Amino acid sequence: MEIRQLEYFRAIVDAGTISGAARVLHMTQPPLSYQMKMLEEELQVSLFLRGTKKITLTDAGKTLYEQAGNLLMLADLTKQEVVKSGQAATLHIGITPSTVSMMSEYLLYFAKKYPQIHFDVHEGSTFTLKDQLENGMIDLTTLRTPIVLNGCETKSLSREKLLVMAVPDHPLLQGHTSISLRELSEQPLILSHRYRKYMLAAFEGAGLVCDIYFACEDARTAMTMAEKGLGIAILPESMLKLTNKLKAYDITGADLTTEILLAWRKGRMPAELQDFLTLFEEKI
């Protein structure tokens, strides 16, 4: 059963006669009649009631008419998508909130050299983007450590300190230029889930316990809660660019850092992704 035969069949039914369909299709009647005969033989059913001047469908013919419409619509949509994808490839990129500024420079550099490639940007937390990457929803993404990836390759983009961030009038911070791990252990802390185990291990390594008062998925939420005065947040240094309501302080007594990674799935990759990674190397 061919797409062309379904188009002919629908045209005959819509026109009401084979001769009428032939005029619409700009062809003669014999080829149309032959194609309908071949279609009936392949399906082993009668599609038309014989002996009537106007086309009348059998039950099988009515079913085929309805299903043929769906198939032809799907074929048309498929054609459009294929043509569209051939005209403009799309690179699906994940970006965490604190890496938007960094990645925008790379995207601008890439766009100038490959203006025909479009971008579909997914914004979200490291854990959300990790899942999207592993499930094939995005081609590559920025992520923050600590993180465990399956079936992915990574490249380190930068490393930065974790800092204490709080409202300027927070009692603990008055007269300080830095905060010790011991002082932090006595305060309600605000963390994103990604740093929970990391910070617990740091406090335990120093023989201390800590009070994780508020834990959340996204570092932006942690920053907002700190801005409201809910507690002291521990956030990457780059997050300071996103707020004018918080002051930042170094943490003494521990070397607390986070790393920004560019990650992509192992194995065969789209040509546009390979081009991006190549240009990425040139830019850095």
Image (cartoon, rainbow, N blue to C red):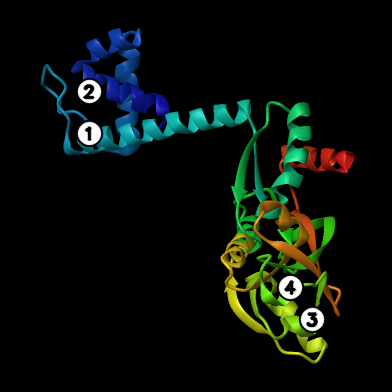
Q: Secondary structure at mark 2?
A: helix
- Give residue 181's mark: 3
Q: Secondary structure at mark 3?
A: helix
Q: Relative to 26, does residue 75 appear above or below in the rendering?
A: below
Quick one: quadrant of the C terminus? Answer: top right
Q: CA distance from mark 1 to mark 3?
A: 79 Å
Coordinates of residue 218 in the picture (x, y in percent):
60, 63
3 and 2 marks in contact (CB < 8 Å): no
**Residue where numbered disc 4 is placed:** 173
| Label located before the other in sequence (1 or 4) | 1
| Label located before the other in sequence (4 or 2) | 2
Q: For this view, does 139 lie left or right of residue 80?
A: right
| Label located before the other in sequence (3 or 4) | 4
Please state which of residues 63 and 31 is positioned toward the viewer in this rendering.
63
Q: Residue at x 72, y 62 (%)?
A: 247
Coordinates of residue 100 in the picture (x, y in percent):
69, 47
- Specify the amino acid type for callout 3: Leu
Q: Residue at x 77, y 39 (%)?
A: 105
Q: Residue at x 65, y 65 (%)?
A: 167
- Specify the amino acid type for callout 4: Leu
Q: Nearer the viewer, mark 3 or mark 2?
A: 3
Q: Nearer the viewer, mark 1 or mark 4?
A: 4
Q: Relative to 30, does residue 205 appear above or below in the rendering?
A: below
Quick one: quadrant of the N terminus? Answer: top left
Coordinates of residue 49 in the picture (x, y in percent):
15, 28
Q: Is the residue marked by circle 1 packed among few (<14), some (14-19), or many (20+) residues within 10 Å? A: some
Residue 188: name its quadrant. bottom right
Q: CA distance from mark 3 to mark 4?
A: 13 Å
Please state which of residues 72 and 82 is positioned toward the viewer in this rendering.
82
